[in-house]
Amino acid sequence: MPGRSATATQARPGFDIPLDAGTLRVELVAPGTLHVQFHKGGHAPAPTIVIDPALHAVAPSDVQVTQEAGGARLQSARLEAVWDKQHGELRIGVPGQAPLLRQFALSSLGHGRLSLIHAKGEPMYGIGGFDATEPATAGLLRDGYRPVTAGEQGHAGAPFVWTTAGYGVLIDGVGGQIALGDTRIDARMFDGGLDYYVFLGDPHAIFGALAQVSGRSPLFPKWAMGFTNSQWGIDEKELLDIVHGYRERHIPLDNFTLDFDWKAWGEDDYGEFRWNEHKFPDGDNGKLKALLDAQGVHLTGIMKPRIHVDTVEGREATEHGYWLAQSDPAPDYFSGKIVRELDFADPAARAWFFNKALKHSFETGIVGWWNDEADDVAVDLQHMDMQRALYDGQRAISDLRVWSLNRNFYLGAQRYAYGIWSGDIRTGFASMAGQRQRMLSAINVGAMQWGMDGGGFKGGTPTPENYARWIQFGAFTPVFRVHGELGQHRQPWVYGPVAEKAATAAIRLRQSLIPYIYSYEHQRRATGIGLVRPLLFDWPTDANLRNDVDAWLFGDHLLVSPVVEEGQTVKPVYLPAGEWIDWFSGRHYAGGQTIEHKADARHWSDIPLYIRDGAIIPVAPVMDHVGQHPLTELAVELFPAAHATRFDYYDDDGKTYGYEQGEYFLQSMQLEAREGSVAFAIAAPQGSYQPALKSWLLKFHGKPAQAVRSNGRALEAFASVDALRASADDGWAIGEDRFGPVTWVRVAAGKGQTITLDVLK
């Protein structure tokens, strides 16, 4: 458990409350973010790893702090904190409204305890998700006693609770308990004193503040947006055969993840960190990497937190004291030899872990990390610290982006290019259905980069229907991958022609949406909201969504509700307020109702996928892998609504950290239907990166245009869509697709402009 040390208080707008054992400091760190902290002896405790070390407070200029005999008041446009000395009460809320939170017994913070009073019946979320085996019947809502822990086997945890009533509470601590009553939040942390942050606003504002305080996540490489095939039980020949199988069938594949097989596990001389020369003879010399690079396939490999004791590296760990105290030497289940777990909380052990052998493995093709089983010792930060060792080690030697998957999550881990997968789940429809609440509850504590073992890890081979439906589900998750236990294969063609066809279509659909998906890498980093989010984020007052896990938003503009029941022919889907369009049929639906999706129980060819009114969705030609061909023209599906909508298109080199120095391409787009016209504004690009993109091919769905202008200049009308496509010039044409009439407009990319369509009223 990390200790705390005293540090000087930074000067931020706020006030002090004198207490018997110390002082309570109440200060504003951002427009809607309050920090309440117990100071002992005039010093504040140092933050734990939950808080971003680079946190920079930006208080609003309109904040006012007043001190008076009856207490003190801090007020800005979005937040008010009042110390009522007479009643011994700290009240927190929005100016001009009843307090959202009230705190009594202020001195208890110095003893690691917090009690907050709130209005009755507010829905509560956060704290923790579910491991791979426990029932997930609780869904998203949280009540009663909850341990604050990273847990194990896919669990995600955070000392964070929030509500759609307009606030979130983040406690700076590692390990503890939170109890949620009808009108109370009671917390106890295990690492000494306790301080907390309050975030005010809707769910978007709350998670934006959470990202600011706990840290923003670096971007994954662009290839990580594609499809990952993971396999346990493989050698170099089979790997190349499988990759060839994907390529000859034109099933997209970007990443192949290797289990134990890739490394010389159990051998001396750093066997845990180097290639298995028997199974992968061309791994160590780099020839395998070159072969796969030419086919656009990246290799990622499993890593374990333990090493063999009776080896060169094991004796080094003993000599330097790198062993984890909570881990005893024991036989390894795979090698049968004695192993022990490393103490990744030790900076020296972390630095040693990314050793010369592992550096060579990285340089010869293992470019991502699948960190397994660091959750077996009940040390909350073991997985985070293990990945921190790999993140810091890779960044020290390379500008290539870090990618990782880990078997649990504790808030703060996202700073280290940290993904989570849901653990060793079973195959079958019931297990697949349970992944919905596991994903959404993980996202509800800030674990935005979530994935699962598509097809199920254990329990044998999924049925063809189960596999096809699982692929469709996985295509609409942040990390899209398949995996099975030793000897299991998860390639689409293994499951017969019907399943292969359905799975291939889903993988190709995912690949066509890469420009849309990758834009949410930027959004997650900028706003704290990732690619996937529960519907209650955008409709927080809709009681039907309080505990809904059946559907979610995939980006701002798509809603998906995968089929997760065997043989289902009719699937009820609740659509929130607004207008919705079926992606496949083009049928329109009014929101605020449950519709009946007709599921294909014979060929599994359908995905319940709906377009939100006002949608802006870039769609690329399907490629065998990310970056197979330069993207010189990009189609954008546009569904104008009577209200303005926005999409920030983002691109960069997809590989390096150049974006941190401004090497990116960002164009904001805004769409709105008006009486007799449609306006589409493209802002001037930001960033220094110059993509291959030369033109936008805009597809305006709805009433066909009578005339089209760009920045007031009339564009040339072409006789047909084919004529427009054959031309290299800007212009427009009328066409039709499954959604009905379409106005196609081609304009140059890379500059600001406003496109106006005159349409019939």
Image (cartoon, rainbow, N blue to C red):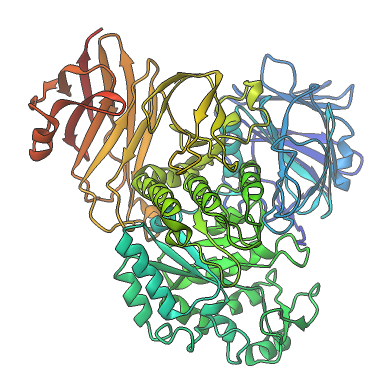
Counting every numbered tag in the picture gives 0
Q: Relative to the observer, which residue lies in front, 719 or 5?
A: 719
Q: Residue at x 29, y 70 (%)?
A: 294
Residue at the extreme front:
602
In the rendered image, the vertical position of residue 704 relative to residue 31, given as above or below: above
457 relative position to 218: left or right: right
Q: Quadrant of residue 7?
A: bottom right
Q: Residue at x 11, y 22 (%)?
A: 713
Q: Position of residue 260 (x, y in %)?
A: 57, 76
Q: Quadrant of the C terminus?
A: top left
663 relative position to 160: left or right: left
Q: Residue at x 39, y 23 (%)?
A: 587
Q: Position of residue 347 (x, y in %)?
A: 65, 72
Q: Residue at x 56, y 68 (%)?
A: 488
Q: Relative to the observer, which residue lies in front, 470 or 308?
A: 470
Residue 406 visible in rendering: yes
Residue 65 visible in rendering: no
Residue at the extreme right:
20
Q: Relative to the observer, which residue lies in front, 360 or 12?
A: 360
Q: Position of residue 684 (x, y in %)?
A: 26, 35
172 relative position to 85: left or right: left
Q: Position of residue 357 (x, y in %)?
A: 51, 84
Q: Quadrant of residue 162?
A: top right
Q: Quadrant of the N terminus?
A: bottom right
